[in-house]
Image: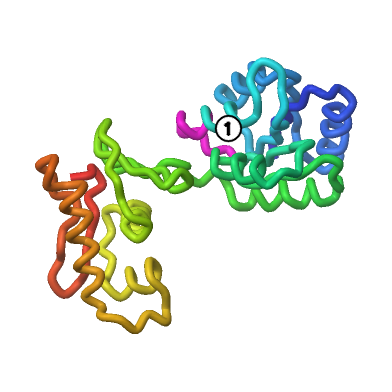
Amino acid sequence: MRALVVEDELRLAAGLRTGLEAEGFAVDVALTGTDGLWLAREYPYDVLVLDLMLPEVDGFEICATLRTERVWTPILMLTARDADTDQVRALDTGADDYLTKPFSYAVLVARLRALVRRGAAERPAVVTAGDLRLDPAARRAWRGDVEVQLTARELSLLEFMLRRQGTVVSKQTILDHVWDYDFEGDPNIVEVYVRRLRNKLDRPYGRSSIATLRGAGYRLAVDGG
């Protein structure tokens, strides 16, 4: 397992290298954000340990850049801050996990092994289908360069369908995930919200991204219609 440690504190970086190598990792170390970003782009690491506060380029920017460039190496963020806003921002930017300094070394190794088992699966922070884009964290959607105003439920339905683009999803499956298992209202509410998405995201732009398959459900086109 090959790990990249991006940490500007020399003693901590050296300690991480020694400890991880003892656990069977092959470890590269970068002391600046610029070097860390370059290495993460150039080499196929199994996991990345990324400090938040770095010289030149901070951890948030590195993480966001890698995800934008479709580099899906699992990222564990290290931070000296314990503010909820920093943790939320790290995860929303594309990090897979985080630890607050000082941390337990045993916990760090266990979390890295868990991330390695999970692998470098594609998990973009912004979900797209053609020129249809959704930022779930910011709760914003766009058709091309035009931002489209959607309600909370419309955003939830759009996210559900974007994450299953190209796949037929039944009305009941949508109800179970976008509403909840205890929903006892009219199941035709799904049709109402699909119609709303079409009216906001498709018809004004001459598109037809959401297809109805009678008796089966709905399918969002992978090219965004």
Give whichever of 195, 160 is nearer the camera. Answer: 195
What residue would you read off at disc 1? 63
State whether residue 204 is above or below residue 55. Answer: below
In reply to whether residue 196 is colored magenta, the answer given is: no
State whether residue 73 is above or below residue 37. Answer: below
Among the 4 quarters of the image, the one containing residue 156:
bottom left
Tag count in the figure? 1
Among the 4 quarters of the image, the one containing residue 95:
top right
Residue 98: x and y in percent read: 70, 44
Give whichever of 73, 43 is nearer the camera. Answer: 73
At x 20%, y 58%, the residue is 196
Q: Of the residues shown, which amino acid type is indicated by label 1?
A: Cys
Residue 182: x and y in percent read: 42, 82
Side of 18 where 214 appears, left or right: left
Magenta residues, as a range? 66-73
Give whichever of 57, 146 is nearer the camera. Answer: 146
Residue 175: x and y in percent read: 33, 72
- Quadrant location of the C terminus? top left
At x 75%, y 19%, the residue is 31
In reply to whether residue 67 is colored magenta, the answer given is: yes
Q: Main secondary structure of the magenta part?
A: loop
Side of 135 where 82 appears, left or right: right
At x 76%, y 38%, the residue is 81
At x 25%, y 63%, the residue is 168
The colour scheme used here is rainbow
- Quadrant location of the N terminus? top right
State whether residue 2 is above or below residue 84. Answer: above
Q: Around disc 1, counting alpha carbons within 10 Å, would you say few (fewer than 14), some (14 to 19), or many (20 or more)?
A: many
Side of 190 where 66 appears, left or right: right
